[in-house]
Amino acid sequence: MTTPCNVNGRTVEVKADPGTPLLWTLRDELGLTGTKFGCGVALCGACTVHVDGQPVRACITPTGFASGKRVVTIEGAGKDRIGRALQAAWISLDVPQCGYCQCGQIMSAAALLREHRKPTDAQIDAAMAGNICRCGTYDRIRAAIKQAAQSLA
Amino acid sequence: MNTPLGDHSPFAPTRRRFIQQGVATSLTVAVPIPLLAQGTPAAPASPPPRQPQSFIRINRDSSVNLYLPTSEMGQGIHTGQAQILADELGADWKRVAVEMPLRPSPDQRITFIGQMRSVGSNGIRYWHDPLRLAAAQARTVLIQAAATRLAVDPASLDAVDGAIVHAPTGRRIPMGDLVEAASALPVPTQPVLRPLSQQKLVGKTVARLDVPAKVRGEAVFSSDVKLPGMAYGAVRLTPVFSAEVERIDDATALAMPGVLAVVRVPRGAVVVAESWWQAKQAADVLDIRFTSTPHDTLDSAEIDRRLKAGLDVAGVRPALTRGDAAAAFSSASKVVEAEYSVPMLAHACMEPICGTARATADSAELWVGTQGHDMIRMALERFAGISNERMTLHTTYLGGGFGRKTIADIALQAVLASRAVGGRAVKVIWQRADDMQQGYYRQTMMARFRAALDAEGRITAMQIRVSGPQLGGQAATGTAVASDPFSLNGLTAMHYQIPALHIDHAVVPLPIPFGAWHSIAHSFTGYWLETFMNECAAAARQDPVAYRRAHLGGQTRMLAVLDQVAKRSQWASPPAAGVHRGVAVVESYGSPVAQVVEMRLVDGKVKVERVCVAIDCGRAINPGQVEQQMHAGVIGGLSAAFYGKITIQDGRAQQTNFGDYPLMRIHEAPKIHTDIVEIGSPLGGVGEPGVPPVAPALIAALHSATGQFVRSLPLVDHKLV
C-alpha cells in the first residue's frame, strides 16, 4: 500500500507505512534532508513543513495524513515569492550559525508571512515561539523576517 | 609596514615545507602546526610533524582549497580562516573552498587542537599565524615564478584576485598557470607578510560561506549522510552511567519489520534496521536488562549533600595561595560571604548525536559531525582495533557542538553496528532522550566565597572553596584527582588585584561523566566571581563598574571592555522606569567580555530586554561573526540561567526533552548590542567568551530589582521565570 501525495510540486507514491512520521518519509525515502529531526515530539520545530499550506511538525504527523495533499519542504520553499524572499533575507543577514534549525525557522516564517504581510514583533514572537534555536540567532531571525516582509511589500 | 616573521616565530626554523606531489598539478603548501613542546629545549631537534592535516592547495584552475582540522559547528570558522588565507595569498574569494582532513594527525607532540579537535575557541587564534605564513609562502613562490616568466622584478608584481599582476604593464597570469613552476622553487623561510592596509577581507563582515546551503536545506549535517545500501541504527543505553548490559533478549526486536540486527555496544545496544523509524520502534521495546550498581539510588539531594559537605572538608591542598589572608580578615572592616551552586547542564545541541560508519574488522570509513576527531581515533584504536591509517573520517557540518561532540561514543557504535551487518553502512541516530540522558554534562558545583573589605570597601583578601566533581569525572578516568585545574579556570588567573588570595577545590567524585560545555568552567566561575564582586560592591555601597575599575588597576583589556559597555548602556545615567541593570566582565579563551543586562520584572517574572556586549578579541577577522558568537553566548548563557538543570533520580538523569529541559525561545530573547573593542590586543577566541558574563550580569540586575542576589541557578527554581 502506498500513499499518494504531492511533494514540492511533484506527485509521488510513498512506500512507507502510513503510520511512519512524515519526517522520516521525507528524509529517508524521498531524500529531502532539509527537514530535520530535533526532538520527535513537536517541541522544537526543526521538522516544520507545510501540508496544504499549513505549518505542521513532520515528526508527529503520520505519513498517511499527507495522503492526497500538497507537502512543501524547505527544498520547495524557493518556488514561491515568500519563501524566496525569506531565503534571500536569511542569506543577506547571515542568520544561521550551526544552521540545523534554520530550515524549520524559515518554514514557520513563511507561514507567518502568508498570514501577516507586515508582522508585528508580537506576531513574530507568536508564530516563531515553536522553533528553538540553540545558537541564539533570534535577533537576526526577527530582522530577517522584517526584511523579507519589506521586500514583499 | 611589512611584517617579516622573525626567528622568534614559533614556526621557525624547521616546520615549513612543501608537500611535493609528483607532477605539479597544484601548488601545495603546508600550514605549519605548532608543536606542543614549542619553546622547550627538546622541540627544535624534533623532525617536523607530517602535515596532511593542514595545507593550502592552489589548483590549475586557480581555485584554492584550504585544509584545516577545525569543524564548522556554527561558529563561522571556515569563513574566517578562508578570509585570512585569501587575503594573504591574493586568492579569488569566490574560488576558495574550505575542506576537512580525512584523519587526525597521529603526532602526539602537537596539541590536540593541531591533531584535530575543535575546542577552546581556538579556530582563529591557533591557526591565524601559521595560515598567514603558509599563504605568504605560496604567494612568494607564485610571484617568483611569474617574475621569471615575465622577466620583471618580483617587487613589481602582486597577487590579486587569483592572478599575479604586473601593474606597470597590466599583464596578468592566473595563479593556476604558475603552479608547476612555483612548485619547483624553494620555499622562503621568512616570507614578507602583507601590511594590514592591503587586507581586503580580514576585518570585514564577509558573508559566511556555509549560509546559502544551510538556508536551502542543502548543507549536509551528520544526520543527512546517505550512502548506497545504508541501514539505520537506534540505541538503547544504560540509564545509570556506570552500569553495563546484563543480558539482551533480542527475539522480539528481531521479529519486528525491517530489523536486521541487535548489536551489543559498550553500555547498551544498537538496533539496526532498514529504516530509522523501524530501528527506533524496535529499540524502544528491546528486552534489555542492565547490571545493578552501587549508584542506583543516587539522587540530586544526595549529590547536593556531598557537595555541601565538600565546602567544609579540611586538608584540601590549595590550588593558589598568596598574601596573608588571615591577617587581612582579622583587620577587616567588613567580611562578605556567599555560597553559590550550579546544576548539571546538558548540551542540548539541536542535532541529536549521530554518525555513520562502513567498517571491516580492521578498517572504517566514517561520516560524523564531530569536534573530537582525535577522540574518535583513540576510541577506534582502543576499542575496535582500527589504526589511524585504516580510518577515514569525513567531517560533516555539526548541528551544534558546545563541547558534547568531542565524545567518540557514536563513532564506536556506528562501527560495531556496521560490522554486525556485514559491513553495510549504518547511520546511528540517537533519540532526544538519549542525547539528554547520556551524560558528559557541565559539572554541578558549589563554592563558598569570603572577602575581607577594608574601611574604603576595597577587597584585601579573598578565600574561595570550590566543591564538586572534576572535569571528566571519575566515571571516565577511573580515579579521582586531588585537584582539578580545569575546574578553577577564571579563578586562579583572576584579573582583580587582591593582595591575599586563597583558592582550593575539594574534589567530590560522582559516578557521572562530566565534559566540556560551552566555556567550560568559566560558565560557573564567571557566575560566582562576578556575582561576588557585585555583592562586595553592594556591601561597600559602591557602583559596581567603579568598584571593578578600582580592583582592575593596569588591566587595560578588562577596563577597555568595561568602559565600552558602560558607555553603550549609558551606565552613568539612571535606566528608564522599571528597568534594572547589572554588569559583569569575564575574560575567557583570550578575550575579555563585559556585558550589561537590562531587564524588567513583569508580574514577578524576569523579562530581559537588552544585553549590551563589549569584547576585545584582538582583531575581529569578521566582525559580523564576532557579533553572532556574542548572540550565541548571551542566549546560551541566559537559557542555562533561566532553565538549565539536569537532575538525578534513581541514579539516572530525569530530563528527556525540551519540555523538561527548556531552551530560551524567541519571545524571551533580548535584543543584543555588540561592540568590538580594538586596542591592539593579541587574537582571542570568540566562540565561548560571550557565555560567562551574562548570568552574573542578570543576577546583578535582579538584585537591583529585588535587593536579593540569587546564589543558585537556574532561575526557574526561584520562580523568577
Image (spheres, helix red, strand yellow):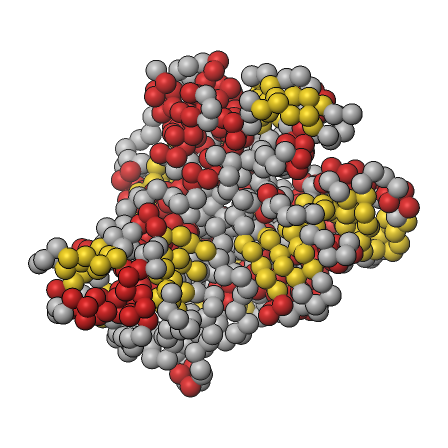
Q: Is residue B55 left or right of residue B675?
A: right
Q: Is residue B63 visible?
A: yes
Q: Residue at x 46, y 76 (%)?
A: B49
Q: Nearest the camera: A20 or B13?
A: A20
Q: Nearest the camera: B155 or B491?
A: B155
Q: Residue at x 22, y 70 (%)?
A: B144
Quadrant in which the C terminus of chain B is drawn: top right
Quadrant in which the N terminus of chain B is drawn: bottom left
- Give the image location of residue B517, x and y in percent: 55, 51
Q: Is residue B655 left or right of residue B62?
A: right
- Give the image location of residue B399, x and y in percent: 55, 44
User: Does residue B593 lie above or below B285 as drawn?
Assistant: below
Q: Residue at x 51, y 36 (%)?
A: B217
Give the mark count: 0
Q: Is residue B521 left or right of residue A139?
A: right
Q: Nearest the camera: B570 or B355?
A: B355
Q: Residue at x 34, y 56 (%)?
A: B61
Q: Nearest the camera: B391 or A9?
A: A9
User: Does residue B307 lie above or below B657 as drawn?
Assistant: below
User: Does residue B618 lie above or below B259 as drawn?
Assistant: below
- Give the image location of residue B265, x and y in percent: 77, 57
